[in-house]
Image (cartoon, helix red, strand yellow):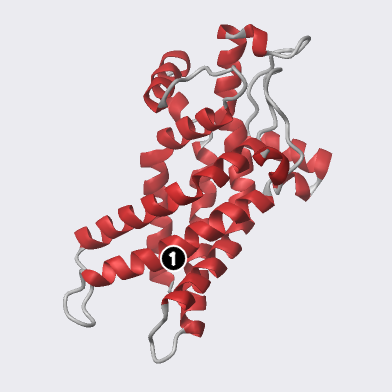
Amino acid sequence: LPAKLINGGIAGLIGVTCVFPIDLAKTRLQNQQNGSRLYTSMSDCLIKTIRSEGYFGMYRGAAVNLTLVTPEKAIKLAANDFFRHHLSKDGKLTLLKEMLAGCGAGTCQVIVTTPMEMLKIQLQDAGRIAAQRKLMPETVPAGAVETKSPTAMQLTRELLREKGIAGLYKGLGATLLRDVPFSIIYFPLFANLNNLGKRGVDGPAPFYVSFVSGCLAGSTAAVAVNPVDVIKTRLQSLNRGSTEDTYSGVTDCIR
């Protein structure tokens, strides 16, 4: 188990470093609405981000993920192994029990995921709001004063001071609706695809098989939960333009 936790943490750090610019583009595209569309596509968003904020602008908010991704992956992997162990019979699991184990893992990980996403989204979307002020001033609320983008620590202190611990867990329900189905799909699909490439009955699968299995399982799960991810992103966003809607909850956002 310790080796799996260490490997999960290292994989999480590498994953954040590699895909964070794509995640930033996703967040900014998901938050666009009601005629205030600054970006037309992922590539357009990344190009405009580099032009206005520099190369490292694509990594705005990455420090939060790099700090919290290790405990998040540790909880997720440990919980999945724990539930798989207790649900297995003679070392074997039915598909339903694999899905239940994934459900347990997804439920446990939101302890870290929700505050991590809450802070990350504010930092990622700050560049979009700043760009809107310059390029689309009609979307800025009347009388709004431009302020310097806060740091993760400043956001944390402000949320705790104004709303207590609940401020960091805004959007918890939407996060559960995203992460639980994701894990229900991802873990069983990865395990079964990986088993297809194993060397012998008990031998490990080659690296390329595990890599492809992870890509296919992750892509399938991400596509399946993307609508809920849009809802979660919009619920957790604190700053909006004057033409952008605010939401009272998941049901209100869906409408």
Residue 124, quarter of the rendered image: top right
Image point (61%, 41%), residue name: 231
Location of the C terminus by quadrant is top right
Q: Nearer the viewer, residue 152 or 188?
A: 188
Q: Position of residue 155 (x, y in %)?
A: 69, 35
Q: Position of residue 140 (x, y in %)?
A: 68, 13
Instruction: Count the numbered circles shown.
Output: 1
In the rendered structure, the answer to whether residue 190 lies left or right of residue 135 reads left
Type of the residue with mark 1: Leu
Residue located farthest toward the left when viewing the structure as drawn: 199
Residue 210, quarter of the rendered image: bottom left
Vertically, is 127 above or below 145?
Answer: below
Image point (25%, 56%), residue name: 212
Q: Nearer the viewer, residue 43 or 72?
A: 43
In the rendered structure, the answer to whether residue 198 lies left or right of residue 186 reads left
Q: Position of residue 157 (x, y in %)?
A: 74, 39
